[in-house]
Amino acid sequence: MSEKQMEWWKSAVVYEIYPRSFQDSNGDGYGDICGIISRLDYLKELGIDAIWLCPVFRSPQDDNGYDISDYQDIDPIFGSLKDMEQLIAEAKKRGIAIILDLVLNHTSDEHRWFQEAKKSKSNPYHDYYVWRDGTESEPPNELQSIFSGSAWEWVPELKQYYFHQFSRKQPDLNWENPKVRAEIYKMIRWWEQKGIGGFRMDVIDQIAKEPDRGITVNGPKLHMFLRELSSVVFQGKNLITVGETWGATTKLAKLYSNPDGSEFSMVFQFEHIELDQEPGKKKWDLSPLRLEDLKRVLGKWQKELYQTGWNSLFWCNHDLPRIVSRWGNDEKYREESAKMFATLLYGLQGTPYIYQGEELGMTNVRYALEEYRDIETLNMYQERIHAGYTHEQIMESIYAKGRDNARTPMQWSKDKNAGFTSGTPWLKVNPNYTVINAQEQQKNPDSVFRYYQRLIRLRKTYDVFLTGYYQEVCPENPEIFAYTRTADREQLLVICNFYANTAAFDLPEKGGSEKELLICNYPDIQDERKLRPYEARMYRYQ
Ligand code: TEU
């Protein structure tokens, strides 16, 4: 398929910025938009094409900005609308699009809509939200918030409950109400006119809720709402649109990312991300990852969305632990395993997403409880300590899966606070910043940063990355994840040793075709049939 026919975002690489932790420009300890502008040349050097910006809208910051009180203003801790317009312009000069993170399932309880809604049942904004009559002692049903506790909050003045799938300061919007949808479409158009290049939509598969029937995800009207949203504000505008859909299956993803453009460009699915938790339990209930499961799941998504949809490709984001600590080796083989995960992902079909610091091989942390900030973590601690879990049990879950693992400040240099802020950082900097930082890695040709840069360039050089058909190689091998991508006149072979021991591998010989080593995470190839700890290689045959 020629470049001109293929949507730009299929060959793009997206970089996720959690603004609060990226770069502080005014010494208040919080990252901000001017800080991001000062780092655009770093991102240009890395080679990315778009920035997914986590919410910077006005917010009381109960959930670090995922509780929006004004969709059309910027929260003062991040700067101003003028700063945002400058970021869009400066990024555009560097060929980088800005993707805004829209939280459309809920607002902050400090949004004017909710402030009006809770005044009376007859207020015109009342049914912008989900209310149920009741008595203080008995919520409408047993639905629980994802951030612990009941999903129903009592308002005595109204003798009603409102529904919130997240914190009580994040009341769910009522998408059944056409006025709510119209308000949202108007707001999105407003941002489009400012030159925004796309949107990430937070928990977008939760908007068609039917709480009386216990439905909080994949509701019956979901795709009707999404098709209306897409046709009214997205289609024909060359935007990248990506939905966060924790409940996605490959069947649903074919609807979300249908090549006819009726919904979105793609979605974030999380089936691979949930493979290291006890089945049917929460992310805090840890279970070791089995490589066979990862091979099965990633292979399924590659095959089932081939020419019928489009994958997003990621290991990390602002809610997830750092991959090198989670499934790699963040001590002896930190760099090798960080590069191995990148190689494994960047040979697949889809749009890759780099989460800030992933390109440096940043790691998880093990802080004291009082040093954590995330509402989800702190609420879970209280819920589980009262349920009889020990402090040590809960802390192990936090070390493994807490969202603050991803939210420690970006490590720019070995200067004070890793060069993130001249003030007191809102969340403690990972003490390993003196070893793991961007400044050191930009000077080192063999760094994780330089490796990501090379992978990004490779993806833009050969069509097989975009169009090749996925086929697993040596599926029975318990230590190696290997696959091919086959296009008309070329084939990619990716082989990754997933563990810290040496693994044997029979390299398939393809008579008559030339074999070229595109990249390897070791300085040389000692033995073609043996992979060293976390060794990864990418070959091209033609
Ligand atoms: O996350 C959806 C969500 O449910 C995750 O928070 C998940 O429960 C868990 O945290 C995975 O580790 C989105 C945003 O990405 C998240 O930051 C927000 O807190 C949440 O929605 C509410 O807006």
Image (cartoon, grey):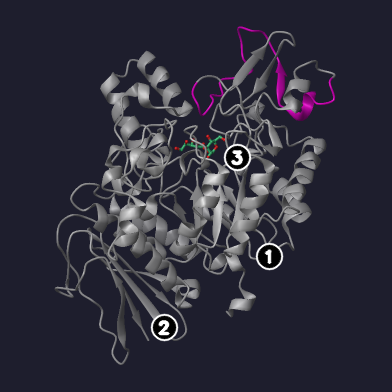
Mark 1 residue element? loop
Crowd rating for badge 2 (residues with CA inside 10 Å; few <14, some 14–19, many 20+): some
Q: Residue at horizontal 61%, vertical 57%?
A: 90
Q: Residues within 10 Å of mark 3 (few under 14, many from 20)?
A: many
Q: Is residue 309 visible?
A: yes
Pointer 1: residues within 10 angstroms few (<14), some, or many (20+)? few
The three-letter amino acid code for the residue at tag 3 is Val
Q: Residue 248 location, x and y as percent?
A: 54, 48
Residue appearing at x 54%, y 41% in the figure: 32
Which-is-in-front pick, marks 2 and 3? Answer: 3
Q: Are marks 2 and 3 in contact (CB under 8 Å)?
A: no
Q: Residue 182 location, x and y as percent?
A: 81, 42
First to last magenta residue range: 123-148
Q: Position of residue 461 (x, y in %)?
A: 46, 77
Which amino acid type is marked by label 1?
A: Asp
Q: Is mark 3 within 8 Å of ligand 1?
A: no
> What's the mark number on residue 56?
3
Q: Amino acid at mark 2?
A: Glu
Q: Examine the image and state in which quarter residue 428 appears.
A: top left
Horizontal placement of 24 versus 453: left or right?
right
Asked if residue 535 lies left or right of residue 377, the reply is left
Tell me which label, 1 or 3, sits earlier in the chain: 3
The label number, if any, that marks residue 260 in the structure image:
1
- Which residue extends farthest bottom? 512
In the picture shown, does residue 117 fall above or below 281? above
Q: Is residue 141 magenta?
A: yes
Residue 490, which numbered label?
Answer: 2
